[in-house]
Amino acid sequence: MTLSNNQRRKMKAASRLYAVQALFQMESADQSVDRVRTEFEDHRFGEIRDDIEMMEGDVDLFRALIERAVEDQVRIDQLTDRALVAKWPLGRIDPTLRALFRAAGAELLIADTPPRVVIKEFVDVAGAFFPETKEPRFTNAVLDHMAHEMIPGGF
């Protein structure tokens, strides 16, 4: 079965959301990347909850994001810290946003997707977790700063 570009885009968007959830779960429940990856791939992708079918995700992107976020967590967290105001160190940030910054940082490091697309996609994820709040704008500012630091010549 061949997927349309729109279907692939939706699967990638779902994988970004799932990656944030997985990274949050890893931190809050102190679970390994292997355990969480297996749980999400076996039970969360395409899950039906309250008669709503969850989107299938792009397994390769999901794995790449969570594995890279774990491998490069120190670097990503340092980039995030520098993007935050001194009064708001990463440890004081909402755990969901911390997971989001780690997933987005991982995708920026992978560099398969243009930074502007990564930023837009994760701003959308922030909007899903924090509807009608300032977090999406905050996310945009932090990720823009991170991307400019990662890619000094601009993007």
Image (spheres, rainbow, N blue to C red):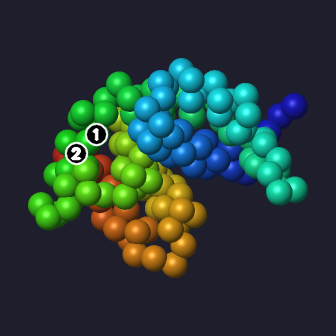
Under tag 1, what secondary structure? Answer: helix
Q: Looking at the picture, does residue 142 appear above or below residue 15?
A: below
Residue under pointer 1: 76
Q: Amino acid at mark 1?
A: Ile
Q: Secondary structure at mark 2?
A: helix
Is residue 154 in view?
Answer: no
| Residue at point 76%, 49% (across, down) | 54
Residue in the foreground of this view, choosing between 137 and 133? 133
Q: Residue at x 65, y 34 (%)?
A: 40
Q: Residue furthest left?
A: 86
Give the residue displayed 47% in from the left and 37% down from the top. 29
Residue 94 figure quarter: bottom left
* Residue indicated by mark 2: 79
The picture places residue 127, in percent across and down from the top left corner, at: 52, 67
Q: Is residue 154 above or below residue 2?
A: below
The x, y position of residue 78, in whole percent, is 20, 42
- Residue 26: mark: none
**Quarter of the picture holding the N terminus:** top right
Characterize the local packing of mark 2: few (<14), some (14-19) or many (20 or more) Cα atoms within 10 angstroms. Answer: many
Q: Position of residue 51 (x, y in %)?
A: 87, 56
Pick the residue in front: 77 or 5: 77
| 92, above or below 42, in the image | below
Tell me which residue sits at (44%, 42%) in the image. Answer: 28
Q: Are marks 2 and 1 in contact (CB under 8 Å)?
A: yes
Identified by mark 2, the residue type is Leu
* Residue 106, x across and y down, in percent: 39, 37
137 to the left or right of 64: left
Circle 1 Cα neighbour tier, 10 Å, few/some/many (<14 / 14–19 / ≥20): many
